[in-house]
Image (cartoon, rainbow, N blue to C red):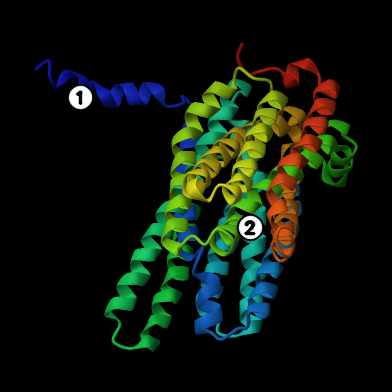
Amino acid sequence: MSVYRPIMSFPRRLLRWLPQLDVRVWILFGGRLLSQMGTGFTLFYAAIFFSSRVGLSNTQVGIGLAAMALSGIAGRILGGSMADSPRWGRRSTLLWSTAISTLGALCLAGANNFGSFVVANLVTGIGQGLFWPASEAAVADITTREQRNEAYALTRLADNLGLGTGVALSGLVVAFAQRWAGEEAQLDWVYRSLFAVDAVSFAAFFAVLYWAVTETRQGAAQSPGRQGWSLAFHDRSLLVYAVVNVLFTTYLSQVSSSLPLYFSNFLHFPPELISGLFTAHIALAALAQLPVARALNRLSRTRALGLSLLLWAVGFGLVWLAWWLPGAVVVLAFLALAVMALGMVVYNPSASALVVDLSPTQLRGVYLSINSLCWAVGYAIGPALGGATLDLPRPWANLLWPGLALSTLAGFVGLGGLSRILPEPINRGARP
């Protein structure tokens, strides 16, 4: 009997190890897991399908994706105001977000020309934009300062697990269909079904929110309206943070844009090796998310962000070093992605928790909207910067990575200035 006792007690030990959070955080975790799984189904196949199957040019596909980014910015601004409004609040904004995202996925499933593709992307972008400020604000409402690192880490874990699972399952579906389809034309419905799965996942998230999540908004009975945005843009600490945050989001964008191109075109990695490296990157991020977030509670917010900057600098340096040490190129690429995964998991909860600390309770939606807009800016700058640099002749193209590593010095300067102007209660660690 004693042999089985440790095995039987494992679930209880696991439950004690997991964060002790409001049940609504776990409900949001499950909903985000569902919706991100659906997003993972279309993540890598949307551009391929509309280019190769529908017949859109690469330029048209790019215009459609740019339309989604632009409407996403509008959605983020609107979402911040709605989340802070007593008329809408966090819950209603999230419901509208998931409903519009469901419609956007269905529009993509039925799009068969350039015009319908652009419209579908515009709708999808608004749905995605509405989601982030309201979701982050809801998590802040139902957690204490000491819990927020782990709570935000949990939501990022849902994103990573969902995307990873969705990408893996969609790959199996497409591979099976390509093997067994009697005619090439029959593959069209397979690709369109991936968008239908995405729509179902958002509809399921809508149901979870509708039946299981209550309104979390606290604070004033009146909406801050435009005055809330004015107050936010006059918050010196928030503006300094936003400038530094654009650096972080620019770094994050390199992982999904410039780095795969560099591995393929400069280091000549085969597709299966690139896929394996990025799968390991996502897996490490998922495994490290909660333990790292718990450890970060002993660091001040700015020191945690400084640690993330250091990890990004080391990661970019390892990518550059891989060019000079061809005998160890695969090992160095793996180490670079591993270090970047740690940089990402240190950054994510620390950044969101700091913005919540900075924001008045009645302006959490607006402040977190500005935080989300930093992602939009970083993901606009990063791919453009990386793509333009990698188009240069060698050795100039290789200078992208040491250039990014050196740019972290500007981040350290910004964080130093931020730590000096932040009140001590905001900048201290969540736990002694």
Q: Tag 1, which secondary structure?
A: helix
345 over 57 or under it: above or below: above
Nearer to me, 264 or 19: 264
Residue 422 drawn at (x, y percent): 81, 23
194 over 153 or under it: above or below: below
Graded by Cα atoms within 10 Å as few (under 14), some (14 to 19) or many (20 or more), the crowding at tag 2 reads many
Image position of 18 (left or right of 366): left
Q: Quadrant location of the N terminus?
A: top left
Graded by Cα atoms within 10 Å as few (under 14), some (14 to 19) or many (20 or more), the crowding at tag 1 reads few
Q: Which of marks 2 and 1 is nearer the N terminus?
A: 1
Q: Which amino acid does label 1 sit on?
A: Ile
Q: Tag 2, which secondary structure?
A: helix
| Residue, far left | 1
Nearer to me, 409 or 131: 409
Residue that badge 1 annotates: 7
Nearer to me, 375 or 303: 303
Real-space CA distance between mark 2 and mark 1, rounded to the nearest whole angstrom: 45 Å
Residue 86 visible in rendering = no
Query: Mark 2 against mark 1, which lies toward the viewer?
Result: 2
Q: Residue at x 50, y 59 (%)?
A: 39
Image position of 199 (left or right of 387): left
Residue that badge 2 annotates: 258
Q: What residue type is labelled 2?
A: Ser
Q: Residue at x 56, y 80 (%)?
A: 51
Q: Quadrant location of the C terminus?
A: top right
358 over 395 or under it: above or below: above
Residue 144 drawn at (x, y percent): 60, 23
